[in-house]
Structure formats: C-alpha cells, structure tokens
Amino acid sequence: MASTAAIGSNRRKTFMAILIPVLVLFCAFNTIPLITGFLYSFTDSKGYGAFNIVGIQNYIDMFSDTRILNSYLFTFKVAIVATLGTNVISLMLAIGLTSKIKFKSALRGVYFVPRILGGLVVGYVFSYFFTYIVPAITGTESILANPDWAWVAIVIVVVWQACAQTTIIYITGLSSVPEDVYEAGSLDGATGWDKFRYITFPLIMPSVTTNMVLVMKDMLMVFDQIVSMTSGGPAQSTESISYLIYNNGLSGGQFGYQCANAVIFFILIAVVSILQTKFLNSKEEQL
Amino acid sequence: MAELSLEHVGKKYPNGYEGVKDFNLKIADKEFIIFVGPSGCGKSTTLRMIAGLEDITSGTLKIDGRVVNDVEPKDRDIAMVFQNYALYPHMTVYDNMAFPMKLRKANPDEIDKTVRETARILDLEKLLDRKPSALSGGQRQRVAMGRAICRNPKVYLMDEPLSNLDAKLRVQMRAEISKLHQRLGATIIYVTHDQTEAMTLGTRIVVMKDGVMQQVDSPSKLYSEPCNLFVAGFIGSPQMNFIDATVGEKAGKVTLSFGTNTITLPDAKGKVLKDKGYAGKVVTLGVRPEDVVDSNEHPANRNLSETIDATVTVYELLGSEAMIYADVDGGSISSHVSATNPARVGSRIKVAFDLDKVHAFDKQTELAIVH
C-alpha cells in the first residue's frame, strides 16, 4: 500500500511539473492581458501616461462611431462571403481529392501548401499580383486601389489560404462515410447530385460544423492580409475590426476605447461560434 | 421476378489476381440460390458483379435475357442486403425504406402504403420513426430487408446478412428469410460461409473455392453426393472423416484396408472402384460422423461394415446426442452416438461404417469415385 501511495504521489508531482509552467505562461500571456484589457476598456487610456476611469462611456461611444460600425460591416461581409466560399471550394476539392484520380497524394500535398505559408507572406505576394500583374494583363487599375472592390481581393486571398486546412478536414469527413452506404445508394438510385445531396452531405455534417465555425472565427479575425495588402485602405474601406483595434489602439492613442471594442468583438465571436455550433450540431448524425 | 444467366463470368484484378474464374450458372425464376465457400473463395465478388458494384472482366451476365454487364447498378432492378446492413444513418427507418422509391419519384401515397405494409410484414411498425443508431442488430437487419422489399426488385441479393447477429437471432432470422422467400416468390441469391444457412435456405447451393465453382446442386444431393473432397469436407458439421485406404480384393469382394482394419464394400461400389482401375491403389475413404456407428448401439436397417477397434479421446455431450472422437490406428475418427452411450474418454469401443453411405475419392484429383 505504501509503495502505491508513493507512486501516486510521484505521479501527482510529475503532472504538476508539466501543468504549472504551462498554466503560468497561459495566464501571463492570455488571462492577465484579457482581464487587464477588460479593465482598460473602462478608461480613457492612450496606451501610455496617466488615464481616467470613464465607466461605460467607451461602450456608449462605440455605437455612434461610424468608423467602428463600418469596420464591423466590412469584417462581417468578408467573413460571411469567405466562409461560404472557402467551404464550397474546399468541399469540391475534397470530393475531387477523394475520388479515383492519379497523383492523389501529391495533389493533397500541393493543396496544403498555402497552410504552411504565413498570412503576411501570402498577403505581400498577392499584393504584388493584384497591383502589378493583374492590371498588366487586364489593362485596368489595381483592384486594391478601388474602395468598392478591394474587399473582393481580400476575400480571394483569405479563401485561397483557408482552403488548405478546410479541404483536409473535408477529406477526413468524406473518408469516414462507409463505402457500403454509397454502394447501397448506387443500387437505390442515388448517383451524381442525389448521392451528394441525400448521402454525402448529411453524413459529413460534423466536418461542415467544424469548418464553418473555425473558418468563420478565422475570417472575423482577419488581420495579416489587411496589413500586407491594403493597410485598411483605400479610404478605410478594408479596415477590419482586428486591424482597427491594433492600429488605433496601439498607435492612435485610443487604447482604452479600442479595448472596449475588443471586448465587444470577443463577445460577438463567442456568440457567433456558439450559435453556429448549436445550429449545425442539430443537423449532425452519428455514423 | 427474373431469370439470371452467368456465362463464363470472370473477375481479374489489375494486379493479375483472378477472384472468379469461368463462372457458369443459370438461375431460374423464384429460385433461392446460395453461394457458399470459405473466405476469399469469390462468392461475394460474384454477387457484387451481379449487383454491378464490381466490373465483370470477362463473360456475360444476363437478367431476363438482357446483357447487363455495362448497366448501372440502379438500372439492373436489383436490391441488395449488405453484411453490415448499410442503412443510411441520418434517415429514420421509414425514410430508409422509402428512399429507393423516393428516388424513383414514386407517388407519395404509394410510397407510404408500401413502407407501412412492409413494416407490418417485418414487424417494424413501432420503429418507423427511429434512426438506425437506436436499433438492435436484428432490427437493423429487418430494416435492410424492408428497404430491399420496398424496392420490389427483380432479384434480391444478400451478402452474409446474418453474420453479424448472435446465434439465437441468426436461427430466428433464417426462418424469417425462408418465410419471406415463400411469401414474395422472389429470386434470391444469398452469400454465406455458414453451411448450415446454405443447407437450410437454398433450393440450390453453389459451392466455391479459390474463385472456382466446385458443385451446384440441391442441399440433399450436395450432402449425399459431394463431387470432390473439398465439397465433402466443407458441407456437413462436424466434417466428413477422411481415411487413406488401399483398394483390395478378398473372396471376390472389393475391400478397403487402412492400418490393421479392412472393410468389405457392397458389390455395386466395389465394382465401380474395380472397373475404374483402382484395384491396389490408395483412395480417400470418406464417411460422415453420423455414418460411423458404435456397434453396441445395434442400429437397425443399416448395412454395416466389419467392426473397427477405436479408443475414445474426446467425448462431447450435445444434448440429445453426443460426439465421440476416437483414435483408430493412430488416426482420428469422429462419430455421432446417442446421449445414453456409456463410452467416455479412454473407453475402447468398436465402430462400424454404414456401407451405403461411404464415399471414395481419388487421392490425386480429389474427385469423387463412388458414393
């Protein structure tokens, strides 16, 4: 018994030795900044020097700030279009990459490349592409210089990059559908579109849920591509919420105000993710 | 319902492996055909070729006289019950059964009537709103059958549909399938590796081995007149006893000798062996356990051989009867005896063969010489 107790004690020590450093780091770089940011949202801090407590004034002001409201409109527009675009394209790619084609493994590797590239790198490459190459070919001005169309360029880039991981998740989902269910379907008459509509899509709903939530969250937090492609321009037409919080909060003297913006943004992302998960979970089936 | 014809059908995979070789079979309307054989013998591959789930690499498959080699599975008018049931997990029992009709754009009233009538036949009425995950194995199996029935196909294909059920449920469902065949008057092709299922269900049985059809016959003929050593050993449980024996002659009668024992064959069987030139040669003597009798049990109406000394090595009481495994000159022989037989492990007994039921097989070709 004594030796069992000693083993148990040693195990606890080992678990603690693993857990505590991670917990300290997580608190230091996540929990404490989160709480601090929340507290700063009730101040008029510029990010330096003295500040005053202003209560919920920052939150009240936010709702009449057209720049913030525009950034929310832009961010949600990009997020919704990009989430749908990413999922549709990824699903098509995944179906192609799970069918009987040659060089399947190599192609899967190629399609995953965008995932291992940094957002800034991709952004700068596409910035060059849209600024110099596309206008040279089409003879038009750069889409990035057009306030009405610059958001489309952002969507193209974020979708291109997000498709890599999303496709892999769909491939996993498609591979989990039992082959004999498809065979039963082929005898029952479910081929082509009917096969996808009645068998494949309902059975990969868990992957759809995962992808919709993950991609939506990533798209709402779009930042790297904005920094590298448009810096929020032209005329603030591509200013995402994350970019606005970073730009105005850290270099615009609105630290407290943008902390309030970040708190609201955090709550919104949480609510959207929970609603999406709840809605999509109700459509899922256990295989 | 329909007639099927498989002419020289073969399946060769890209790596050169031949799963099915030169398969020829005509299946009459309303027949219950069983494909039976050990794992990897090609029975499921043949069934899948009929269904259209595997390409036919050679030969011709006809349904009602129409060549269907290149016809899509959905257009062959065939329904299949899979080993793992292959139910649609996201659909209710009702939707699973209605799905084939729905895809054919049948009238909704007709769909509803058919599904409910089928559910009544299969005792699924109370389960119509459940999903497959909420059903037991037996219930899922019945839903899979129901889906096939609603389809009202020309031919039913069943790929080991009972193999995932427990022993008791399997016996119950076997009887249900048999009743269903009579009720539907359907042409059914049924794959199994369980020879009891094959014997009890089939009107004809196709025994396969290594992609080659070994014998096609009625269950009783297959049991009493197996065409070769493989069929003789595969059909029947426990399997037939095989003993190497030398064909001889004594007082004008043909004998079979093994170890220190000699049995005298009936004239008709002896003549066949002699006429076919087996005198002095070694053949394989085959005798089923129920045809090896303990001479103390005095079985009546049996044409018994000379007695053979044996020592019991294993005794298994099966309820109404018992199995004895006994040592005969270093070889083992099994025998069905009555449950009241006093023999136990170590007992020395005298057994005799029912001479009307002994078989002889060629040692080289393994083909049957005489039954």
Image (tube, coloured by chain):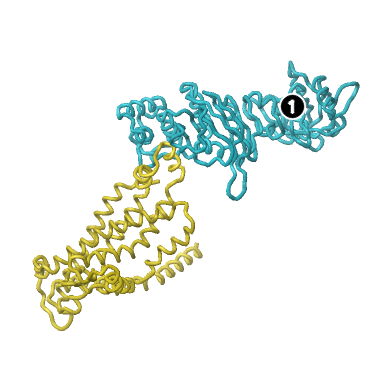
Report whether B348 appears left or right of B186.
right
Task: Estimate the x, y position of residue A170 in percent, counting from the top left.
Answer: 38, 55
Q: Residue at point 28% right, 70% down?
A: A130
Q: Residue furthest top?
A: B301
Task: Estimate the x, y position of residue B196 in percent, counting from the top left.
Answer: 59, 30
Q: Amino acid at mark 1?
A: Val
Q: Residue at point 63% right, 26% down?
A: B217
Task: Estimate the x, y position of residue A172 in percent, counting from the top left.
Answer: 41, 55
Report whether A35 appears left or right of B307.
left
Quadrant location of the C terminus of chain B in the rendered image: top right
Query: Which chain is rendered yellow in the image?
Result: A
Q: Chain of mark 1?
A: B
Task: Estimate the x, y position of residue B12 in percent, counting from the top left.
Answer: 60, 44
Q: Residue at point 49% right, 64% down?
A: A2
Query: Which chain is rendered cyan in the image?
Result: B
- Asked if residue B247 can be seen in this view, the reply is yes
**Pointer 1 residue:** B292
- Asked if residue A30 can be seen in this view, the reply is no
Query: In front here: B54 or B331?
Result: B54
Report whether A18 appears left or right of B25.
left
Above or below, B39 relative to A142: above
Disc 1 secondary structure class: strand
Write down the quadrant of residue B257 in the picture. top right
Q: Residue furthest bottom?
A: A49
